[in-house]
Image: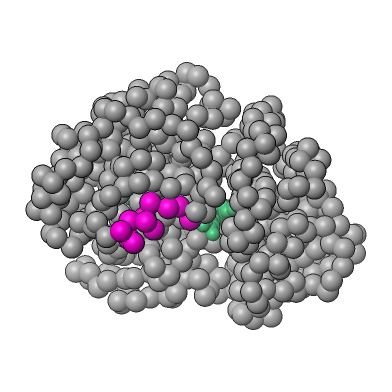
Amino acid sequence: GSAPIVMQRNPMFSTINADDITKFKEILGEKNVVQDEEVLLAANTDWMQKYKGSSNLLLQPRTTEEVSQILKYCNSRCLAVVPQGGNTGLVGGSVPVFDEVIINMGSMKNIISFDKDETSKVKAFVPIQSGGRVIFRKTTRAKVIFRNEATVPSLDFGCFVSIRFVMPLDLGAKGSCQIGGNVSTNAGGLRFVRYGSLHGNVLGLEAVLANGTVLDMLGTLRKDNTGYDLKHLFIGSEGSLGIISKVSILTPPKLSSVNLAFLACKDYVSCQNLLLEAKRKLGNILSAFEFLDSHSMDLVLNHLEGVRNPLPPSMHNFYVLIETTGSDQSYDKEKLEAFLLRYMEVGLISDGVLAQDINQAFSFWRIREGVPEALMKAGAVYKYDLSLPIEKMYDLVEEMRMRLGPAAKVVGYGHLGDGNLHLNISLPEYDDTVLGQVEPFVYEWTSKHRGSISAEHGLGLMKANKIHYSKSTESVHLMVSIKKLLDPNGILNPYKVLPSSLTS
Ligand code: FAD
Ligand code: 2HG
Ligand code: ZN
């Protein structure tokens, strides 16, 4: 069963009628106004199969102009909408709560242009990625170097946009998620430790406001201090302020030398110290530092086919993936090997292997990236995506394990290099008694340690009413004012991000 959501539909919103359908068909053409039950069932259900809406209508715009016309009409009729990308979000933000119109962005996937300047920083208007492949259409501008279909990112180390450049973002959902969804959630992912936040990597964007106004903020400059930098409002606003229709993003050069180590550590303190040393000793070649506990490893081994632990069976409590990316294969490899040897000698590393080829590297990544999928297959799951001081992070996992006893599997993994813990509680089925033991404890604990209750997934529906654990009353009120200014009828992704009591 799914988790029940006790909430009232906002009666201010209209319901779809035949005239609306006619109007949408006029704007989009017959086939992009979707009422097919099977398609709607999938689009109403989130990736975890936990949140389910009951929308009867999905719209597929192909251009900014179409998005603008749809929103203008919905706003005039007070029809609520939910923008949807790849529907891989983990906080119930990408599916309707009631009968909101689903605006699916999957058809907007063109690369508009691709430039490289002398310093070889590359700016690209990147499309929306979809369906397991990045589809690159030929475009009109001369500098475009992509052909129709470029690399399949899920088979490679990173999320490559071409032979020569990489996306500064990589995450387990790369086969399905879309750039628009990534930017709307300000996704973090596996290379954050190297490339940093999308707030730094997104150079510009175009957004369509609730009333249909198109905001062109599609700059490609690195520096631009002319007034308030409005694009940042849309990065991470989870579809509540506007629909992102275009993005320009930095794509750093793809470096030829990538090395990946899969390591075991006896305790959390060793992982933590290893991170400090890695930042110091590997410096700028460090491109990922991820961890998982043995409970996460067990889940992956039990629920995913073809996955095996590359290290001989032993009582390892933690696993760490360290990736380096640089430009000199022999130098980088030597550097990493020397690092591993040294920290094995002093006991921070108990065992480890270095990937010998791309297939092996892929199989190591599969273990880490497979944890969410294994958890989903294991049954019901409560997910907490927390930023915490690194030295305190795993205490929470242990306290939670003690608190819940053997009835629940409590697992901890995540982006250790960024202080981002993924605390997951796995149960055969959803259980309100267990949930009552977990919440508000987990939020209070996080707040007490001045952490964030959403490091990278957003607030969505799950945590809209929990924002005060991480943000001051004054900040929340300013957010509500901004929401009301940009979307006075509240049609954009209602019930999400901000507490409903303040927005409706
Ligand atoms: P959706 O899920 O469709 O939407 C997410 C939110 O953005 C919704 O609120 C939606 O309304 C809004 N939205 C979507 N498109 C637009 C648009 N064009 N304009 C305005 N609003 C829009 N997240 C991380 O941060 N790091 C990870 O490492 C990571 N790993 C993941 C691994 C797996 C296996 C899965 C299933 C998810 C993972 N996620 C991760 C969460 C999720 O993939 C990201 O949040 C992703 O960025 C969502 O993109 P999407 O296209 O699927 O968006
Ligand atoms: C990851 O890093 C994702 O694997 C998902 O952000 C985290 O499932 C989760 O809690
Ligand atoms: Zn993550």
Asked if residue 20 lies left or right of residue 427, the reply is left
- Helix, strand or loop: magenta stretch: helix
Q: Which residue is more in the foreground, 266 or 11?
A: 11
Q: In which quarter of the image is residue 314?
A: bottom right
Asked if residue 144 lies left or right of residue 460, the reply is left
Q: Can residue 121 be seen in this view?
A: no
Residue at position x 58%, y 27% from top?
469
Q: In which quarter of the image is residue 433?
A: top right
- Specify whether residue 107 is painted magenta: no
Q: Position of residue 308 (x, y in %)?
A: 72, 74
Q: Where is residue 130 in the image (x, y as percent from the top left)?
A: 38, 65
Asked if residue 90 lies left or right of residue 25, the reply is right
503 versus 124 height, above or below: above
Q: Give the range drawn in magenta.
A: 37-47
Q: Quadrant of the C terminus?
A: top left
Q: Where is residue 483 in the image (x, y as percent from the top left)?
A: 34, 29
Most distant residue in the right direction: 346
Residue at position x 13%, y 46% from top?
18
- Specify whether residue 40 is painted magenta: yes
Asked if residue 281 lies left or right of residue 164, the reply is right
Q: Where is residue 455 in the image (x, y as percent from the top left)?
A: 57, 42
Q: Which residue is more in the foreground, 331 or 290?
A: 290
482 versus 212 height, above or below: above
Residue at position x 11%, y 48% from top?
23
